[in-house]
Every structure is written in C-alpha cells, then in structure tokens.
C-alpha cells in the first residue's frame, strides 16, 4: 500500500467525506473490492461510482496500477479533494470526473465512451438503483462490485432475473455478472 494512502483517507474523514470509524477497517473493507476483481486482466477500465473521499476508489487504484481508473462524483468539493489526492499519491492511471453518473451513462449509451470492465460502488445509492446504473456502464463480460451490509441478502431473485445478472458474495462485497445467453458468451 502507498505510504500516504491511509493519511489521505484520514484527511477525507476529517473533511467529513465518510463516517468516524477506523480508517484501517475502511481500507480493509475496500481491499475486498480489490480481491473481488483480482481475476480481471491488467489494462482494464474501472469506474468507481460516487467516489466521495476515495473509498474504495483510491484503494483499488493503489492495487490496480495497470488499469485505467475513473473516480466520479457529482460534488465539486469531493472531486477537488480526489484530484489533489491522486496527484499526491502519483496515480497517473486515475482520472477524476466531477459529473452526475447519468451523464457518463449517456456517454456510454451513445457510444462516445467505452463501457467499463469493472464498476464499483460503496455508498452510491439504494441497492437496485446502484445496480441498474452500474449495468448501464458495464461491458458485456464485465463485473459490478457493490459493498454489502454485514448481514442479510438485499438482492431479490426477481430483481436479478429482471436485470439478467447473477451474483455471488465475496465477504463484504457482492459481485454481479451478466448471465450468459443460452447460445454462449455475450462477447
């Protein structure tokens, strides 16, 4: 881990970008996102929705230096912080976008932006909204990784069937992939 990463996350906490819990625990939780995408090839495109103070985005960026990573948040104060953090940490493979995620979805939908291989989200919005939004950004064979509460399953089989995805739990995160059509792979 980059030596300044935990201090950067502590700064984000002091600015109120996430709650008062242990930064070490929060970084360990973010490491579960890294583990969930370990099998994804280097050179992938990753987007973190509602990046806020940088969890899990900065932890993923630290571990996945061979990927092109986008941290997106609609709040200027947070993206200003993230831009400074990215420079401080020397993450040249990371872009910070101050925009509503729907704008990015429109860009991908219109073919002006390539879809992403991985979409991550920690606290973006209600679960169904988060998953629907992430799928709008996802390449056919990509995966979505969303933070999960400590107990319970919040993904109804009906929602997963409607969206054509399957999920599996990886510790504190859920990983979603599109179901393969009966004829074979989607790409």
Image (cartoon, rainbow, N blue to C red):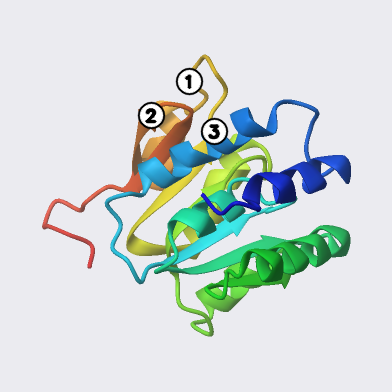
Q: Nearer the viewer, mark 1 or mark 2?
A: 2
Mark 1–mark 2 distance (CA, rounded to whole Å): 9 Å
- Residue position marked by numbered label 3 in the rendering: 29
Query: 26 or 172, which is in the foreground?
Result: 26
Question: Going by the picture, which residue comes out furthest to the bottom?
Answer: 112
Disc ID at residue 3: none
Q: Is residue 171 left or right of residue 56?
A: left
Q: Nearer the viewer, mark 3 or mark 1?
A: 3
Query: 79 or 104, which is in the foreground?
Result: 79
Examine the rendering and report whether any part of residue 138 can be seen: yes
Total of numbered circles in the picture? 3
Mark 3–mark 2 distance (CA, rounded to whole Å): 14 Å
Whether residue 58 is situated above or below residue 151 in the rendered picture: below
Q: Are marks 1 and 2 in contact (CB under 8 Å)?
A: yes
Q: Quadrant of the C terminus?
A: bottom left
Q: Nearer the viewer, mark 3 or mark 2?
A: 3
Mark before the other along the chain sequence, 3 or 2:
3
Q: Residues within 10 Å of mark 2 (few under 14, many from 20)?
A: some
Query: 163 or 47, which is in the foreground?
Result: 47
- Give percent across and percent down for residue 46: 48, 63
Disc ID at residue 153: 1
Question: Going by the picture, which residue comes out furthest to the front?
Answer: 3
- Residue position marked by numbered label 2 in the rendering: 169
Examine the rendering and report whether any part of residue 132 can be seen: no
Query: 186 or 46, which is in the foreground?
Result: 46
Name the element at disc 1.
Answer: loop
Whether residue 109 is situated above or below residue 39 in the rendered picture: below
Q: Are marks 3 and 1 in contact (CB under 8 Å)?
A: no
């Amino acid at each position: 881990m980059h030596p300044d990463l935990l201090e950067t996350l502590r700064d984000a906490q002091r600015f109120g970008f996430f709650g008062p819990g242990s930064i070490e625990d929060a970084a360990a939780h973010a490491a579960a996102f890294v583990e969930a995408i370990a099998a994804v090839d280097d050179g992938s495109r990753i987007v973190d929705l509602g990046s806020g103070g940088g969890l899990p985005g900065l932890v993923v960026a630290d571990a996945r230096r061979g990927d092109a990573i986008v941290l997106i948040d609609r709040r200027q104060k947070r993206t200003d912080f993230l831009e400074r953090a990215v420079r401080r940490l020397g993450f040249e493979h990371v872009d910070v976008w101050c925009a509503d995620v729907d704008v990015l979805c429109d860009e991908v939908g219109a073919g002006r932006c390539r879809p992403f291989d991985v979409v991550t989200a920690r606290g973006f919005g209600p679960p169904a909204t988060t998953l629907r939004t992430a799928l709008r950004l996802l390449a056919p064979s990509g995966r979505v990784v969303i933070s999960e509460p400590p107990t319970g399953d919040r993904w109804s089989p009906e929602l997963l069937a409607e969206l054509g995805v399957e999920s599996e739990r990886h510790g504190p995160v859920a990983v979603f992939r599109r179901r393969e059509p009966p004829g074979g792979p989607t790409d």
